[in-house]
Image (spheres, rainbow, N blue to C red):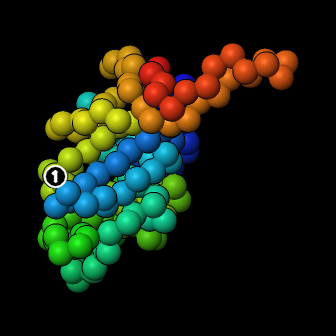
Amino acid sequence: MTDTATTSAGQGVRVEQGAKRVRAYLGGRLVVDTTRPLLVWEKPFYPAYYLPAADIAAELVPTGDVDRSPERGDGQVLDVRVDGATAAAAAVRYDASPAAELRDAVRLDWSAMDAWFEEDEEVFVHPRSPYTRVDILRSSRHVRVEAGGVVLADTTQPRLLF
């Protein structure tokens, strides 16, 4: 699978579209499940995930604080709440970012979540950079391969190459 495609972003922000399924949990409850993560290089060595707001299952509650970034604009700081668990100030959304790709995305604080998964494998510390490693990940996505109307493969337990 292709992991990323570079997109243009304003003010020097490097944003790429990822292809991995990404999930995060808080208090054992699903916070986000998406196959449309954005990889954003806030630090030079590895990306952060920005996740489509539409794919966030948790309640995002404004704190009244603002995260100011010259590259990303002013971001609204949000508490993350899901089924009685709360992560204070654990999300930021840049609704008016000069980088248009970020406007409908939410960055979750990695360390505020209990667990992160890429496909069906838990990831620790930060998202994996597609430029420093090759990953073959276990997945539960349905994959079906056909050629000329003949099914060559059909599985819900694929190994995906990124």
Instruction: In the displayed orientation, state which residue is furthest to the bottom.
Output: 64
Q: Amino acid at mark 1?
A: Asp
- Which residue is found at the position 29% from the left and 51% from the top? 24
Q: Is residue 103 visible?
A: no
- Dividing the image into 4 quarters, which one contains the N terminus? top right
Q: Quadrant of residue 29?
A: bottom left
Residue at 30% in and 33% down:
121
Residue for point 39% across, 63% down: 56
Q: Which residue is mark 1?
A: 114
Is disc 1 placed on a helix, strand or loop? Answer: loop
Q: Is residue 90 left or right of residue 16?
A: left
Is residue 12 rendered to the left or right of residue 90? right
The image position of residue 124, as x and y in percent, is: 18, 36
Rendering coords of residue 33 (x, y %): 40, 53
Q: Residue at x 25, y 55 (%)?
A: 25
Relative depth, front residue between 4 and 147: 147
Residue sticking out furthest to the right = 148
Mark yes or no: residue 126 visible.
yes
Q: State which quadrant residue 106 falls in.
A: bottom left
Q: Residue 37, image x and y in percent? A: 44, 47
Please tell me how many numbered marks the rendered image carries.
1
122 or 128, nearer to the observer: 122
Rendered-image quadrant of the C terminus: top left
Mark 1 neighbour class, 10 Å CA radius: few under 14, some 14 to 19, many 20 or more: few
